[in-house]
Amino acid sequence: MSAAFAPGTRVRVKDDWPERRGPCHIRTPHYLRGREGVVQAVLGEFPNPEDLAFARPAPRRTLYHVLFDQKPVWDEGEAGDGLLVEIFEHWLEPAATPTQEAA
Amino acid sequence: MSAPARPESIALLERLVAALQARGLVSEEEIAQRQASTDRASPEIGARMVARAWADPEWRRFMVANGAAAAEQMGVSMAGAPPLGILEDTPHLHHLVVCTLCSCYPRAVLGYPPHWYKSFEYRARAVREPRAVLAEWGTVLPAGMQVRVVDSTADYRWMVLPLRPAGTEGWSEEQLAALVTRDVMVGVALPRLPVAAAAE
């Protein structure tokens, strides 16, 4: 299995709310749903905790470290402040805002 | 006079352990070993890692690349433990660790998490207004320092590798380790020189 998103790629956390559909276990914080960030690192592959929590067979999923600007999420903080969060690949999609090419 | 009633939670735990043992899923010895290694873990381990990273650039690179391997070199058994990530502070970037979902914490190198780390207040506020939380801790960041909150939501555990304070040139690793508290490695505090040393 290879990572779909390379470091530096702009991604969007899916605006999905499985907790509204029934019992579930989710590691994606609510405050990041629908938010855009940048992949900082590929952390590896881990059994999907959403399955592990219910003792189901848990396929391995790629885990990313994704960096989000603090300001758009909470309207707090100073320029450059950020939130660095572990997000599984199946929660990520390409961002609407294109990845900026390195200068 | 009868003995005080035991909490229901203790009886429940005993029944769970008995059920696991009856099914051969865990032995008494394994439980004792895990309890012993959990009790041995303390912030002193993390502090020794930080001090060595300050003193030895090669070790620093090794530790940042593979925190678990570095912990193993300090005598910690990381078998079955989650990977350990190292967050390098820089002159322009300060890290603060929280777990908003529960209480994920690098127990292997920091020991038991403090109660405040698990509180709803810390978990809600650290991610939302980290600068206000730091200010209440008495932690004053230099102007222009960016704050990066690391929300520990999944399979890694994170510890902060802070900046080595000025005025510690020539210090031994033992002296340096004494500056590195649990709070420093969570990121709510900065390493501080003892008043006597700072006044010299």
Image (spheres, helix red, strand yellow):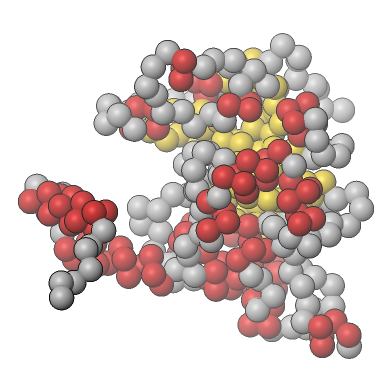
Does residue B169 appear anywhere in the picture? Answer: no
| For residue B131, side relative to residue A13 (left or right) | right
Residue B54 against residue B26 in the figure, above or below: below
User: Is B99 left, or right, of B13 in this rendering?
Assistant: right
Seen at 23% across and 68% down, the residue is B4
Question: Which of the two residues, B47 or A23, is positioned nearer the viewer here?
Answer: A23
Taking the spot 68% from the left edge, 57% from the top edge, the residue there is: B187
Q: In which quarter of the image is residue B39?
A: bottom left
Residue B56: quadrant of the picture: bottom right
- Could you tell whether A28 is left or right of B197 in the image? left
Viewer-side residue, B156 vs B137 = B137
Residue A88 pos. (x, y %): 51, 28
**In the rendered image, which quarter contains the C terminus of chain B?**
bottom right
**Residue B116, quarter of picture:** bottom right
Residue farthest to the left, as pictured: B22
Counting from the top left corner in percent of width and height, residue B82 is at 44, 49
Quadrant placement of the N terminus of chain B: bottom left
Callout count: 0
Mark yes or no: residue A74 visible: yes
Q: Residue at x 80, y 70 (%)?
A: B165
Residue A97 appears at what percent x and percent y?
76, 14
Q: In this view, does A2 lie above or below B113?
A: above
**Residue A74 vertical placement versus B175 (above, below):** above
Asked if residue A95 lies left or right of residue B40, the reply is right
Residue B140 in percent (x, y) is at: 83, 59
Residue at image position (56%, 36%) is A86
Residue closer to the observer: B60 or A36: A36
Query: Farthest residue toward the right?
Result: B143
Residue that protrudes farthest toward the front in the picture: B1
